[in-house]
Structures are given as C-alpha cells and as structure tokens.
Amino acid sequence: MEVVILPTAEDCGRVVADVIAAAVTAGPDGNRPTLGLATGSSPVLAYRELIRRHREEGLSFAGVRGFLLDEYVGLPAGHPESYRSVIRRELTATLDIADSDVHGPDGAHPDPLVAAREYELRLLENGPVAVQVLGIGANGHIGFNEPGSSLTSVTRVKTLTEQTRRDNARFFERPEDVPRHVITQGLGTIGRAQHLLLTASGARKAAAVAAAVEGPLTASCPASVLQWHPHATVVIDEAAAARLE
Ligand code: F6R
C-alpha cells in the first residue's frame, strides 16, 4: 500500500485527479477504462479538478464507463440525494460521459435483493474496474460495508449504522429522511478493481485512517482490506494522517 500525505485536501484532490486522468488517457480510445466512483464529500475536490481539466485542458472521458459504489434503497429515481443524481451533478453531467455509461445499483427496484444481484453481475460483465475511488467512513466503512462486513462479500443490501445515518444527515432535510438501507458493492467486489484509491481529509477521519492503514486486517475496520490488495493508494491530508505512527 502506498500512503501519500499532503498538506491540504486541495492537494489530495489534485493527486487523486492525476491518477484518474492517467487511467483515462492510458488506453487507446477504443479501450477506455471503467472507473469506480465514490460519492460523498471526500472525492469532490478531485472531481472538480477533473471537470477543470476537461474544460480547460481538453481531458476527454469519451468512452469511459462509471460504476457507483453504492445507492440508497427506497429513494425514488431522480431524488436529488440518490447517488445516481449526486454523481451526475458533481461529475458526469459536466464531462463527456454518456448518462447511459454511468451505472449504479437500482435503489428504487421493487426487490432490492434482486437489484443487488443484478448489479454484481453487471460489474462482472463490465469489469475489471481500473481505478476504484473510495472515501472512508469515520467507523472505517468503505462503500457501505459497515464494521462486521464479510471481507469477501459481494454486492448486497446492508443496514446503515446510526453513526453513518447521522453522518449523512447533512445531505437531507431532516435526519429521519436518511434511508436505513443501501445496496453496496461488497468488500470482495471492491477488491476486484485493479487499483484502489482511497482519499480522506480532516481530523474526523484520522482514527479510521490509522486503523485502516496500520491496524490489523479485520472486519471491524472494513477499509483494512486495502492492506490485502496488490495495488492500493491512500491519499490523505495532514489532519487525516495525524494518528499514523
Ligand atoms: C459513498 C461511500 C461512502 C463514503 C464515506 C465517506 O459512495 O461509499 O463509503 O465514501 O461514507 O463519506 P464522506 O466522503 O462524505 O466523508
């Protein structure tokens, strides 16, 4: 695992954008990569930087396919806080990525268990993901694999912990509006990506980052699976790195 510690969250955003841009421009046009896209606050500065490079430097994403990590269960399609809407708003709508090339679990499916199985199959058919962008929850989750998740799990329905619901309440009008269930790629699913790229900033993430990077590999800290992966990069600012040895 490589750990890159930079002074500010803005610096982290630029480095994460560098890695994604390198993957996008690496292959010939007919062989554009599949990107794994996290939502939430952590990747936002990187996504803004990619948009800037697209607008000002002509970085093209034509032919790139994006796969979301997770989705809330029960929000109607088009709800502004569904992760499909969020990723469109914060990244893909401004890039030259066709909407039909952005995939996510169908959180509005009448049977979320079926939607989870279908998404896992779609990932298998379209993989491998070249670069999987990840944030980390204050409790060490990646995707919505909360502590205790099986290290080899595949895409499935999970119940959010109260801590994660509280953490995400900032995106909703009322705390009780945060859905209780999600469909998330499993830790095994995430591990199939060729390159895991986790980014975090701020002191609130310092304990989780230390557990993921220097603690034991354990389901109690799902992000510790990065230690298992042949190509994992952690890009963090100094505040998030504060509890590393
Ligand atoms: C989002 C996701 C979550 C977030 C994590 C951190 O798609 O899968 O694991 O990355 O909850 O959230 P932020 O970045 O908002 O602190």
Image: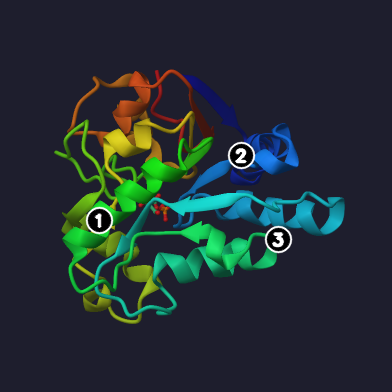
Question: Residue 151's image quarter?
Answer: top left
Q: Amino acid at mark 2?
A: Val
x and y, in percent, of residue 156 in the image: 21, 51
Quickly name the residue at label 3.
Answer: 96
Residue depth check, mark 1 versus mark 2: number of the one nearer the observer: 1
* Residue in the image at 60% along x and 40% along y: 33
Residue picked out by circle 2? 16
Secondary element at tag 3: loop
| Badge 3 residue CB within 8 Å of ligand 1 | no
Amino acid at pointer 1: Ala
Task: Estimate the x, y position of residue 221 in percent, counting from the top left.
Answer: 24, 33
Q: How many marks?
A: 3
Residue 199 in view, yes or no: no
Question: Quick check: 208 above or below 56?
Answer: above
> Could you give the CA–CA distance between mark 1 and mark 2, rounded to whole angstroms?
28 Å
What residue sits right under mark 1 in the picture?
A: 116
